Amino acid sequence: LRRVTYDLTGLPPTPDEVAAFLADNAADAWEKVIDRLQASPRYGERWARHWLDVAGYADSNGGTDSDSDRAWAWRYRDYVIRSFNADKPFDRFVTEQLAGDELLAPPYGELRGDDLDKLIATGFLRMAPDPTADNPADAELARNQVIADTLQIVSSSLLGLTVQCAQCHNHRYDPIPQTDYYRLR
């Protein structure tokens, strides 16, 4: 019980949960525990953090010393947690993050529920460090770096590829040539 509770929620079982499990002599006692843990909001919080790490989730823009806040970032974090708790199919989860705005017809002013989630999901594409909000000296170079970092996040998280070197040249360790990098970009 202790191991599965840590695995699924990241937290230890409470003394009451242990006592209830030990007192349950039903043949499906174990299955009930698993179902209860997977239905817990803590389940999504525990497992969403792995995806948020991959996506580069941050509550600030990064890239400069001032490191300004992303006032909206928590919405993306909560979307990921809701998706895990709802057991959203992975293909839908990915599609919403890459093109959620394309799944909706403008205007976006009065969105609610799943439609709003589709738009929030595109926060995935804004998780790269972004110094452009802090007016860097070379804004064009900063914008280019944000795009390159976003492409790196997308390719490493969804394609299992690193493509950093291909931005500048063909490289024997990168799995794609420079021409394919710019096609992807």
Image (cartoon, rainbow, N blue to C red):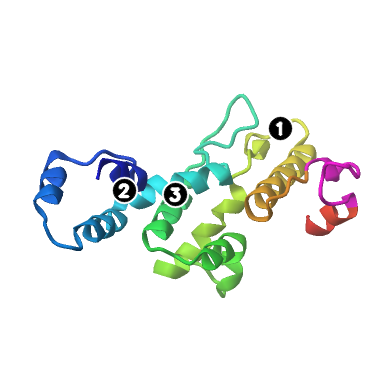
- Residue at 25% of width from left, 60% of height from top? 31
Residue 31 forms part of the magenta stretch: no
Give the SS element for disc 1.
loop
Q: Position of residue 79 (x, y in %)?
A: 44, 56
Q: Amino acid at mark 2?
A: Arg
Q: Position of residue 174 (x, y in %)?
A: 82, 45
The residues bearing labels 1 and 2 have C-alpha atoms spaced at a distance of 39 Å
Q: Which of the two discs, 1 and 3, labels the residue nearer the N terminus?
A: 3
Front-most of residues 185 and 1: 1
Query: Magenta residues?
Result: 164-178
Report crowding for label 3: few under 14, some 14 to 19, many 20 or more residues within 10 A (C-alpha). many
Q: Amino acid at mark 3?
A: Ala
Give the SS element for disc 3.
helix
Residue indicated by mark 3: 48
Proximity of marks 1 and 3: CB atoms separated by less than 8 Å: no
Whether residue 19 is visible here, answered yes or no, is yes
Q: Residue 42: which disc?
A: 2
Q: Position of residue 152 (x, y in %)?
A: 70, 46
Residue indicated by mark 1: 136
Give the SS element for disc 2.
helix
Reply above or below: 140 against 64: below
> In the picture, which quadrant includes the N terminus?
top left
- Residue at 88% of width from left, 51% of height from top? 177
Can you name the residue that lies furthest to the top here? 65
- Residue at 39% of width from left, 67% of height from top? 113
- Residue at 11% of width from left, 55% of height from top? 24
Whether residue 112 is visible here, answered yes or no, is no
